[in-house]
């Protein structure tokens, strides 16, 4: 069973929350493995690494490239 972790930052603004969710989806798309659950991706990458990526803007900088990449095209569910 996966255990949740708190990020080192508290988000109180709706836009900040939506941006973190967007970054989490981009991270999962970019670094997740087909069929892997998000919690398993976090465990594999390490929470500290994931937190660092979510709190920076690097995932947003790579957003267009990430979305254009043809990833996970084996068929079936990818989440």
Image: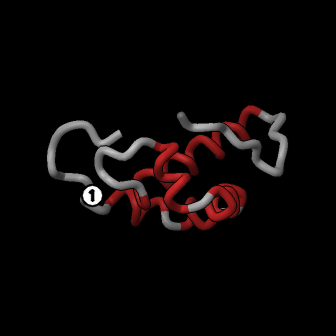
| Snapshot colouring | secondary structure
Q: How many marks?
A: 1
Q: Residue at x 56, y 45 (%)?
A: 22
Image location of residue 41, percent across then percent down = 47, 52
Which quarter of the picture shows residue 21?
Answer: top right
57 in relation to 26, above or below? below
Image location of residue 37, percent across then percent down = 42, 42
Circle 1 residue: 71
Residue occupying the far front of the picture: 1
Q: Residue at x 84, y 34 (%)?
A: 12
Q: What element does badge 1 sit on?
A: loop
Mark 1 closeness class: few <14, some 14–19, many ≥20 residues within 10 Å: some
Q: Is residue 10 left or right of residue 16?
A: right
Q: Residue at x 52, y 43 (%)?
A: 39
Quadrant of the image containing the C terminus? top left
Q: Residue at x 76, y 47 (%)?
A: 7
Q: Nearer the viewer, residue 42 or 19?
A: 42
Image location of residue 45, percent across then percent down = 53, 62
């Amino acid at each position: 069973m996966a255990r949740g972790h708190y990020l080192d930052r508290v988000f109180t603004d709706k836009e900040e929350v939506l941006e973190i969710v967007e970054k989490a989806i981009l991270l999962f798309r970019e670094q997740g493995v087909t069929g892997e659950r998000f919690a398993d991706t976090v465990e594999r990458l390490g929470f500290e690494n994931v937190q660092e990526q979510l709190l920076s803007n690097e995932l947003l900088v790579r957003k267009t490239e990430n979305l254009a990449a043809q990833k996970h095209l084996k068929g079936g569910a990818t989440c």
